[in-house]
Image: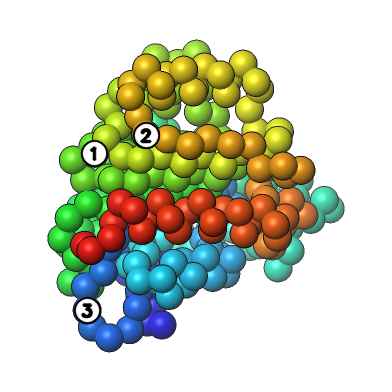
Amino acid sequence: MPTKTLQIPTKDGQADAFAAFPAGGERHPGVLLYMDAIGVRPVLREMAGELAERGYYVLVPNLFYRHGPAPVIELPEHIGEESRPAVFAQLMPLIEAHTTERAQRDADAYLRFLSAQPEVSSGPVAVIGYCMGAVLAMRAAAAHPDQVAAVAGFHPGRLVTDAPDSPHRLVSKLTARVHLGLAENDMSSEAISELNQALDAAGVSYTSEIYPGTVHGFTMSDTDAFDPAALQRHWDRLLPLLDLTLADR
């Protein structure tokens, strides 16, 4: 399975990224994969590789590129209870600096770059994300309804807030099919209800479910939150969504 290290031109510089895609020289549907808050690391390369083996070109940008190339901070091989506080003490300033305005500028650049790659077929793409990346995926899909046919978010960050530009207030702009896979501790029942009501009112084709017995971060095998059964459920939901929306591209 080929991979590439890439530099994505943005309005604020060059975002380092990697891509995974099938061998053979043919063109394949594009998928933009938004990292979780911990950043680009081997587990995300493995997940991108899984998608590439299924026939997709997967672009994974370093969202924190303004602070340096990935890995922006030194990460342990496993992020457990003891190491997590120190890791997030370093990550929080990067997360807080990644404003909605920056994220939207970057999304424009990422999607433009993805569609221009010679290995990517013409037509719609999918955007998927984990943790904070799930929020960014929803924002990107809402901002680019003519380009994004599918959006999936797993153990998402805050999709319902009081802000005027809260992600749940943007869903009327979506044309993509949506799947949201929630951990049991991701959102209150009130927030889930408010999000689902917004999706229903907008006529969005979506599925939203709480993955049983999970905590935030359940897809990430290098953390204590990892749940193998939930990771498999994630694939069981994600792959049919991509097949349905991007098949024959």
* Element marked by disc 2: loop
Q: Residue 70, position in %: x, y?
A: 49, 63
Report the residue marked by disc 1: 144
Closer to the chain start, of discs 3 and 1, is 3
**Is label 1 or label 2 in front?**
2
On the image, the x and y values in percent for residue 15 come to 34, 57
Q: Residue placed at 47% from the left, 72% from the top?
A: 49
In terms of sequence position, does the residue under pointer 3 or pointer 2 come before the other?
3
Quadrant of the rendered structure where residue 224 is?
A: bottom right
Location of residue 98 in the rendering, given as x and y in whole percent from the top left corner: 45, 39
Do the numbered discs 1 and 2 sit on residues whose CB atoms are within 8 Å?
no
Horizontally, residue 234 falls left or right of residue 105, namely right
What residue is drawn where x is 30% and y is 32%?
174
**Residue 65 seen:** no
Badge 3: residue crowd in 10 Å (few <14, some 14–19, many ≥20) = few
Residue 206 x/y as whole percent: 42, 35
Residue that extends furthest to the bottom in the rendered view of this protein? 24
**Residue that numbered label 3 is attached to:** 26
Identify the residue at image location x=62%, y=16%.
Answer: 190
Q: Amino acid at mark 3?
A: Glu
State the CA–CA distance, disc 3 to disc 2.
31 Å
Judging by the rendered image, the residue that carries numbered circle 2 is 205
Residue at the location (23% across, 83% down)? 25
Give me the C-alpha separation between circle 3 and circle 1.
Answer: 26 Å
Q: Is residue 78 left or right of residue 247?
A: right
